[in-house]
Amino acid sequence: MKYNSAIVFGFNEYAKQIIRQISGEYPNFEVFVMSEEELASVHAAGYEGELFDLGENWQSIQRRFDLNSLIVFCALHNDAENVFLTISLRSVFWHLPIIALAGEHESARKLKSAGANKVMPILQITAGVISEMLEKPIVNEVIHDILYENSALKIAQITVPKDSFLVGKYLYDIDWASEFDVIVIAVVDHELSATFSFTSKGHNHHIDPEDILVVIGYDDKIAILSEAIGVQQ
Amino acid sequence: MIGRWIVGFAFLLHTSPRYRHYKKFFHNLLENPSYPYKKFFDYVMMALIVLSVYILIRHVKHEMSAEWLFFNSYVISLIFLAEYLLRLWVYSDVSKIIIEQYEHDLFLQRSFGWRSAVRQTLSSKAGYVFSPSAIIDLLAIMPFFHELRMLRIFILFRVFKLFRYTKSLTQFVSILSSKKFEIFTLGLFATVIIVVSSVLIYIMEANNPESPINTLFDAVYWSVVTIFTVGYGDFVPVTEEGRTVAMVIIVAGIAVMSFATSIVVSAFTEKLDEIKDDKLVDDVSKLSRFYIVCGYSPLTREVVQRFHKSGKTVVVLEKDAAKAQEAHKAGITALAMDSSSLATYQTLKIDFERQVESVLLFQESDVLNVYTALTVRELSAGIEILSILNQVENRRKLLLAGINKIVYTQELIGLMSKQVSGKPVAFDVINALRAEKSGVYIEEIALDNYTRNRFFDTITLPLFQKRLIVLGLYKTVKKSFFFNPDATVDIEAGDVAIVIGTRALIDEFKAMTYQKGRR
């Protein structure tokens, strides 16, 4: 799903880095902060900003954004406030995609319970990257390049259309590596849809419409594969 | 003339590399606890002591062969004598003392006072000769003169030599010596009580024909046995006056014993933390490969847990004792020491090149991290240092301080948030691979001359096809990554393959490639 609008709550160092990375991706982008000083900083940095409190009044969001193509990032400094913000948004916007930051492991579970669609546990992510940097430096470098697009190698998720030639086939029927020069590392079963499964687990998955393939490959090869599958560009 | 000879000889020794080499070797062997061969020397000496005492005990009621007795009286004694003389030799540097005296006299334009130099030399050696441990060493050599039968008992002094070789015994003595004043007071109190009660009981009992206490020695013996609450019962007062003295001394005895117990217990309680810390420092200095983490924080806990999971050893240095204690409670080896201080690493006797994998700086201040990095760099130019970056504007300073890898958490989260919003499933997949909780792992396999030739043959076996994914090949020399490589790619020794699969399959692949490669 491609979103047109995004809101970042907070203007701390984490929020600033999120803003830096995503602001260019969304035509409608705004930063919501809790104090006048922060609002002044937001404006000084060249972003649109608005004040909010942790109450129930979210009329400005309803008025200014198309809720069907809006995504929000809860990046307040305090975990408890982040949980409260998430629950407060969820109580009003039932289908709004909410991504929240969690400082502590404990808060990550609370944010999930509060209704966040995705939680980014800061400590676990950082610890994972640090141990990977030291124990598997090459893996770390390669993943970093794939994820953050420093190289032509990309990771993509391709949804299988209804009329694709893949529908009805099994995952292992196709030699993805030699035919398309891509690697399918995981599949999301549309019927089960709860989570993904790794292809290397050995399960020969039956491909249905709306299944999602997570592939790694060069940009052009992914484009060729998408076209072959029948994805509308 | 004598002075010139002495100075000439001193300079000869001082400048002789061989002499200095041997002296350093014996100093390390006898006195340096971190010298790797010292422990073997100590074990041999302990074994000799135990053997010597065993021969003494056995000889009481059994005949021993002449060889064993010769071994005990001469060979062991000679070894101990050699050890005594070597310790005397390495205790102080005679040539240095003489040269210093010579240069001092030369500076003051006086003729060399060799008598003063000899006096200083003897005085320096006397420091060793009259030390308690050296006296024990000397007494342990005495059985050498076995013709004097009485001197055989000195074999028992060899047991005291064990203090030299076992740290716990030395610690026990040092703990008790911290309570010297209390022990002295208690000794004085006990002596006064014994003297007074001995005299009293002698006066009360000695003239009574029914009393077993007839001599002053009997009286002293009775007093000692009673005051230390042993009370064998072989000597008992029979007069009313004597029994009154006994009642008083029994009460005093309880006081003495309670006082003695409390001194020992309090000494141990006070020193317990110190003993634990010393043990920890000792253990750390003996570790072979480990990570040093400077600063204890929730991030430290997370990273250490991951390292522990993969079987790595980690030592945390945290200046704040309360935080170090907290880390200790979480099952982490933590020392309450300042990671930015050179003295810390000197105390720990860490050899960075040999023992340390990497140094991780997790302190919540860039100032501290830079300072610590510079301290570490002073000790090792090559060690890998990773640091977190707290303020983005300090990145360059961290690099200038010699930090190899920098992690700026905020930036990492920013980059990830872009992925999460754009490709949430892909983000989850990569995260699951990194977290190693899904049963599927991403691994590096280093290829050598043996395995590189069989890599593609093995990966195309039916067992691995489709199930073990070769994401790519990292060419170490060219520092380039080949995605989805096929058999046309030339693998060189040192290249690294990145594979994705279950643990069992990766291990099987490694084993099979290695076996095939070896054939």
Image: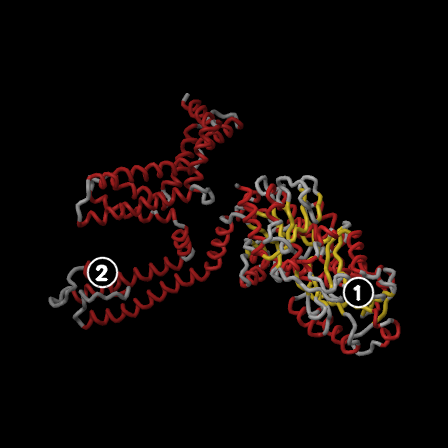
Kindly report the distance in space between the C-alpha atoms of the residues bearing marks 1 and 2: 111 Å
Q: Residue at x 68, y 72 (%)?
A: A110
| Camera-side mark, 1 or 2 | 1
Residue A118, picture quadrant: bottom right
Q: Is residue B126 visible?
A: yes
Q: Residue at x 25, y 41 (%)?
A: B72
In this rendering, the count of numbered labels is 2
Amino acid on which disc 1 is placed? Asp
Foreground residue, B26 or A65?
A65
Name the residue furthest left: B209
- Residue B220: mark in rendering: 2
- Residue A212: mark in rendering: none
Image-based side of B348 in relation to B467, left or right: left
Name the residue furthest top: B1
Q: Disc 2: which chain?
A: B
Q: Secondary structure at mark 1?
A: loop
Q: Is residue A76 visible?
A: no
Q: Residue B25 in the image: state x and y as whole percent.
A: 44, 36
- Residue A163: mark in rendering: 1
Residue A203, picture quadrant: bottom right
Foreground residue, A130 or B361?
A130
